[in-house]
Amino acid sequence: MLVDSHCHLDRLDLKPFDNDFDKLIRQTLEAGVSHMLCVSIDLESYPGMRRLIQDYPQISVSVGVHPNDLDRREPEPEELVALASDPRNVAIGETGLDYFRSEGDLDWQRDRFRRHIAAARQSDKPLIIHTRAAREDTISIMREEQAREAGGVMHCFTEDWSMAEKALDLNFHISFSGIITFKSAAELRDVVKRVPLDRMLIETDAPYLAPVPHRGRSNIPQYVSHVAACVAELRGLAPEEVARITSENFLRLFRPGVNE
């Protein structure tokens, strides 16, 4: 059993699946991926994303606005809480800080992050945090806004062990994507070796960041098996054991189906 803890199913290229979403999901399940979390990046596309997954109990959703989208409508915590009350909704996000792709005065980004943390605390749903080139501010805001109370995951983690330790201390899991299979990811693979197994998740971030040997192509949820295999090699475990552990971690953190 594998779980893809972070993907964007509404943004996948369905041409290889005859433009048939159902065919994609059938093949994903046949490949051993038993559950997927389809993650929101803006409120405008959320209703369509929610309708897309309606008939598939193997798919959960989150609600949030990505930190890079300056022109998106800013969410109020109350709106996020209301949307998160949906039984299929298991998390708030993705949210966070990204200074790599945004420039200038980024107070709006920090304010948006704070709104999401408030919503997660109010709704008792975990946070999905995106962070890039913003290590100090990300951890500072998590501490200031008491993100520990919500818990959650640092998704597609690409930072160093020092930041991973701080996030773990704040009650967060660490999720690894196909980036760990890249030749350039030696420092990140060291983090993989050190994160406690009971706090680790794996993901694809599909359609982005396809792992080796599919790098450069559009990513799909079933490629999460390559992430599991890489973790297994780094930790001296069987891939099946990594799949079991990370799936159990996902179910414990996000509790899909609890309120259905």
Image: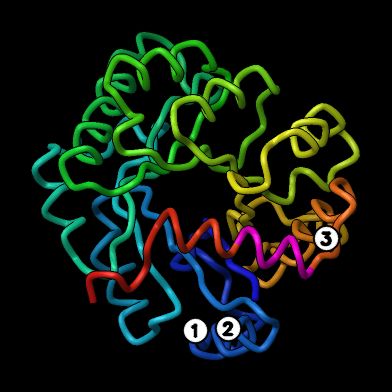
Q: Which residues are magenta?
A: 240-246
**Secondary structure of the residue carrying numbered label 3:** helix
Residue that mark 1 sits on: 21
Residue that mark 3 sits on: 229
Name the residue: 32% across, 59% down: 90
Q: Amino acid at mark 2?
A: Leu
81 magenta-colored: no
Residue 75: % across, % down: 18, 39
Horizontal arrangement in the rendering, residue 204 relative to residue 72 (left or right): right
In the rendered image, which quarter contains the C terminus?
bottom left
Against 28, residue 179 (above or below) is above
Residue 4: % across, % down: 58, 64
- Cα–Cα span, label 1 and label 2: 5 Å
Residue 115: % across, % down: 21, 30
Residue 82: % across, % down: 11, 54
Residue that mark 2 sits on: 24
Q: Indicate which disc, 3 or 1, sits on the residue closer to the N terminus.
A: 1
244 magenta-colored: yes
Q: Label 1 neighbourhood size at 10 Å, few (<14), some (14-19), many (20+)?
A: some
Q: Label 3 neighbourhood size at 10 Å, few (<14), some (14-19), many (20+)?
A: some
Name the residue: 44% across, 27% down: 170
Residue nearest the observer in this picture, 116 or 74? 116
Name the residue: 65% across, 60% down: 245
Q: Indicate which disc, 3 or 2, sits on the residue closer to the N terminus.
A: 2
**Secondary structure of the residue carrying numbered label 2:** helix
Indicate the colouring scheme: rainbow
Name the residue: 82% across, 36% down: 189
